[in-house]
Amino acid sequence: MLATHGFYLPLDPQYRAGKSWFENLTLPLAVGDEAVNPLRRSGVLLAGCNREPESADDDGVLTGLDVLGLDLRGCELAVLSACESGLGEVRDGEGVGGLRQAFLAAGAERVMSTLWQVPDLESARLMARCFELQATGRPAAAALREAQREAVARRRDKNAAAHPFFWAAYTLTGRPDNSRL
């Protein structure tokens, strides 16, 4: 599980120059063809991402392209509790490129990720409940759905409404878990 800040950067002139929208962070990008690669524009921020890298391999940014170099065979579930970790770019003849797809291509069977910027507290509660449910034997899809339904009920009880922003960002992609949902 990665619980951090994730990103998917749209292709724009500022990004082509190698600067991201993160203050004080320059992603290790080349200009030209490599800068348009959606796997270079998606990732998560790790320790050290906001300081000068000591080496090219120690920049604190894990991009989709970096993930492709991992051997994740045997990983049943990769959880990316990070903003926009499920976004990508549709490319003709290639499908969708992004962080979620990189984890699947590297061998993870399933990836839980988000489609927009998620609020920290609600995400922490949702993920904690999802893991509790999985620990009791529920498959990931069923656990996520039940945790989301409980989040909806809590928000309705508290606010008389349950806007999807707070609970619906999480998705599960990959191999079915072969169970009744």
Image: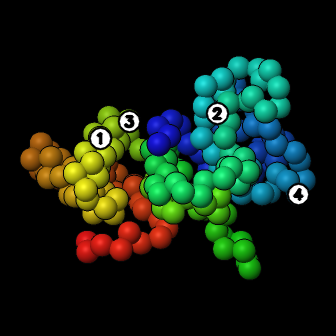
Q: Which residue type does callout 2 highlight? A: Phe
- Residue 120's disc is 3
Q: Quadrant of residue 125?
A: top left
Secondary structure type for disc 3: helix
Of pointers 2 and 3, the one earlier in the residue sequence: 2
* Disc 1 versus disc 2: nearer the observer: 1
Contact (Cβ within 8 Å) of mark 2 with mark 4: no
Q: Amino acid at mark 1?
A: Ala
Q: Which mark is residue 22?
A: 2
Q: 124 and 22: which one is in front? A: 124
Vertical position of residue 118 compared to residue 140: above or below: above
Would you say the residues marked 4 and 1 are in contact, meaning their CB atoms lie under 8 Å apart? no
Pointer 4 or 1: first along the chain:
4
Report crowding for label 2: few under 14, some 14 to 19, many 20 or more residues within 10 A (C-alpha): few
According to the picture, the residue beneath numbered tag 4 turns out to be 33
In percent of width and height, residue 115 lies at 47, 56
Q: Residue 128, labelled with which disc?
A: 1
Question: What is the three-letter code of the residue carrying label 4?
Answer: Asp
Q: Nearer the viewer, residue 89 or 146?
A: 146
| Distance of label 1 from label 3 (alpha carbons) | 12 Å
Q: Secondary structure at mark 4?
A: helix
